[in-house]
């Protein structure tokens, strides 16, 4: 799990993905890809040419994590900030963060009042993010500026990687979507010495968390015939769960519906058939509360058959999240086996619509 640990602990909020792009490039190069390229936004892909000149398959995670940006340095030395990606205000107070200046990193804490000072009305409301600030231990604004902290500096949550006592549950920050990056890289490595009837483009996009922005340019660089987004879904296995929703340990996650896309049914069915053929455990996700890069992938040019495959995760869009190692392994195997089946005839079978 050293690679996943490195990916999750890398600091790369939306628009500042360089640290993860470096890891992706290194791992793609070591996997023996035929070429590596980036687009003008910073998304990165490695190409592996299979047998013949088959369809172009795009396998893409995203490199960015939710975080913040410094927007104001108060005269007292506190930092005001704005979110990069979706946050629920209630998960922020008293959490540690890293402010990344051009010269060095600084640890800060999102300030909160002790209960002794709370007024009755404050105890019963969610503290709004616009009123929050970050304390870096500075005495005043001049000291902050002398240290090199500036407006525009990115702010990254802090949470170390940890394998839990069951030896399956992984706890870390940024599993959305560094786990996707890990799955893409491992699926790519599994195909290193195997034949596949297509040209595989495996990599990761940028700025997914702020509006699927990298997903708009990446297809123009790859020109895919089929696109698979690799991302985490939401585990719904809390204390009140009835066991019918996505859960940790239940297998890979195949998205049937989200707010941005209804997947190509033929591609979806091929993935399900592949999972059942190889006895790969899987779960189905239908939720209208969000979307992934596939929401842009499937709209490229005249339309690209697209699907989302991943794993369920707990507590995403906070400082910490959890996933299952077994689910991760299932997703890697499912992707590798599906890619082996994507030849010209198969792709045409779910793209040649008849009257």
Image (tube, rainbow, N blue to C red):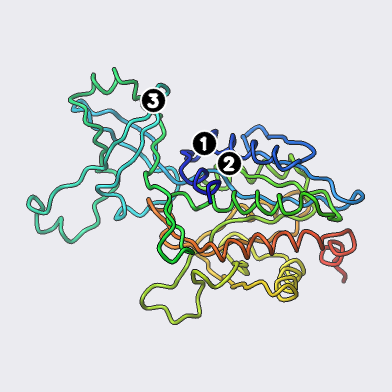
Q: Which mark is residue 15?
A: 1
Q: Decide which of tag 3 and tag 2 comes sooner along the chain.
A: 3
| Callout 3 crowding tier (Cα within 10 Å): few <14, some 14–19, many ≥20 | few
Q: Which mark is residue 256?
A: none
Whole-percent x, y for residue 84 in the image: 43, 42
**83, 96: nearer the viewer:** 96
Q: Are marks 1 and 3 in contact (CB under 8 Å)?
A: no
Q: Is residue 173 above or below residue 344?
A: above
Q: Point out residue 341 in the picture as x, y percentages from the top left corner.
A: 82, 63
User: Residue placed at 34% from the left, 25% from the top?
Assistant: 149
Q: Which residue is mark 3?
A: 104
Q: Residue at x 15, y 55 (%)?
A: 122
Helix, strand or loop at disc 2? loop
Mark 1 crowd level (few <14, some 14–19, many ≥20, 10 Å Cα): many
Q: Is residue 78 left or right of residue 48?
A: left
First in residue order: circle 1 vs circle 2: 1
């Amino acid at each position: 799990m050293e690679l996943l640990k490195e990916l999750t602990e890398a600091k790369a909020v939306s628009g500042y993905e360089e640290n993860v792009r470096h890891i992706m490039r290194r791992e793609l190069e070591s996997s023996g890809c035929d070429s590596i390229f980036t687009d003008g936004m910073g998304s990165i892909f490695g190409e592996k040419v299979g047998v013949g000149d088959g369809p172009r398959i795009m396998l893409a995670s995203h490199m960015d994590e939710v975080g913040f940006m410094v927007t104001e340095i108060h005269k007292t030395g506190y930092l005001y900030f704005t979110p990069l990606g979706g946050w629920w205000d209630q998960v922020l107070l008293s959490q540690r963060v890293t402010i990344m200046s051009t010269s060095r990193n600084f640890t800060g804490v999102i300030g909160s009042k002790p209960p002794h000072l709370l007024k009755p009305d404050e105890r019963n409301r969610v503290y709004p993010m616009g009123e929050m600030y970050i304390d870096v231990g500075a005495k005043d604004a001049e000291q902050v500026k002398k240290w090199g902290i500036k407006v525009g500096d990115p702010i990254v949550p802090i949470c170390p990687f940890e394998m839990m006592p069951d030896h399956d549950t992984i706890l870390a920050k940024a599993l959305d979507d560094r786990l996707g990056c890990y799955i893409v890289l491992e699926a790519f490595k599994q195909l290193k010495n195997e034949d596949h009837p297509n040209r595989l483009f495996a990599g990761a996009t940028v700025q997914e968390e702020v509006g699927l922005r990298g997903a708009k340019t990446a297809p123009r660089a790859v020109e895919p015939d089929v696109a698979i987004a690799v991302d985490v879904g939401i585990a719904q296995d809390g204390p009140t769960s009835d066991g019918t929703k996505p859960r940790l340990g239940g297998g890979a996650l195949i998205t049937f519906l989200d707010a941005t896309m209804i997947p190509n049914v033929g591609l979806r069915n091929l993935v399900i058939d592949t999972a059942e053929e190889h006895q790969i455990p899987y779960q189905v996700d239908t939720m209208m509360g969000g979307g992934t890069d596939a929401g842009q992938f499937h709209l490229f040019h005249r339309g690209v058959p697209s699907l989302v495959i991943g794993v369920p995760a707990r507590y995403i869009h906070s400082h910490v999240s959890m996933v299952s190692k077994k689910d991760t392994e299932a997703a890697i195997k499912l992707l590798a086996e599906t890619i082996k089946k994507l030849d010209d005839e198969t792709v045409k079978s779910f793209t040649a619509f008849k009257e």
